[in-house]
Image: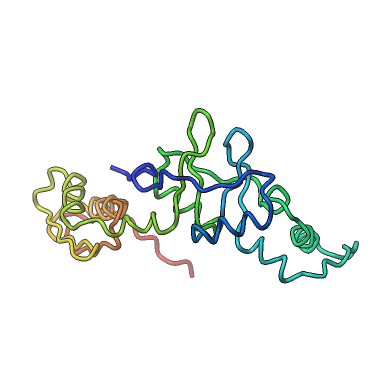
Amino acid sequence: MPIKVKDLMRNVAIAVREDASFAEIVRTMRRYTLGAISVIDADGRPVGVVSEDDLLLKETDPVRHSTSIFDSHKRRAEQEKAAAITASALMTTPAITVTPGTPVRDAARLMHDKRIKQLPVIDVVTGRITGTLHRSDVLRVFSRSTGELEREIRAVMGDRTSVSADVSGGVVRLSGRVARGSDAIQLVEEIRRVEGVIDVVSELTYDRADLVVVPPLL
């Protein structure tokens, strides 16, 4: 059964309002040791995020030269942020969010693709922030006990009594025999999708090879 965000999220959401000052943002991030902080509107809905990179622009561009028509769009945006003094001007939008029911695997993919360290968790009905999911929270899936993994893997294997699975350090070693080569591949892929499995080593054999091998083009 896929692990959901609600199973790993932190139920305390640290956020600032849109009118929060630069100094207030820095104080809050330092107090709670955050690399980024959500920005919420008056109704408690996330509208953006301020990261350490956004704040560092104040130091990297202290002179804040006037923009030029020859500046790139990225450069002009950085100069505007370097001159900003409130969360609404500093934040990156739109806010990327998840809900308690989002599969952790999908949340991890979002973090990786968007290069973000945390995700605000919102109520699916009101859109208000209810918690936060950090990268370190997601990595907890790899600390699941061997017994917990074994139970879930047995459920995936079902009635395949001719197959056995040995779990050690999150690595699953499959041995035994199945009817077809495609069955072996399917079982390996299903076990790879179990949350907390680091790798699957297959030593499975099969009675019939039903996979078509396409010869390389000459």
Visible in this render: residue 204? no
Residue 35 horizontal side relative to residue 176, left or right: right
Q: Where residue 15 sits: x, y (%)?
A: 55, 47
Q: Residue 97 versus residue 21: which sits nearer the camera?
A: 21
Residue 209, image quadrant = bottom left
Q: Is residue 69 above or below residue 157?
A: below
- Colour mapping: rainbow
Q: Where residue 62 sits: x, y (%)?
A: 78, 69
Residue 51, image quadrant = bottom right
Residue 207, image quadrant = bottom left
Q: Residue 48 versus residue 182: which sits nearer the camera?
A: 48
Instruction: Name which residue lies at 67% across and 44% down.
Output: 18
Q: Where residue 20 sits: x, y (%)?
A: 66, 48
Q: Where residue 88 sits: x, y (%)?
A: 70, 47
Instruction: Name which residue lies at 39% across and 55% down.
Output: 138
Residue 216 horizontal side relative to residue 171, left or right: right
* Residue that protrudes farthest toward the right in the picture: 69
Instruction: Name which residue lies at 79% across and 62% down.
Output: 79
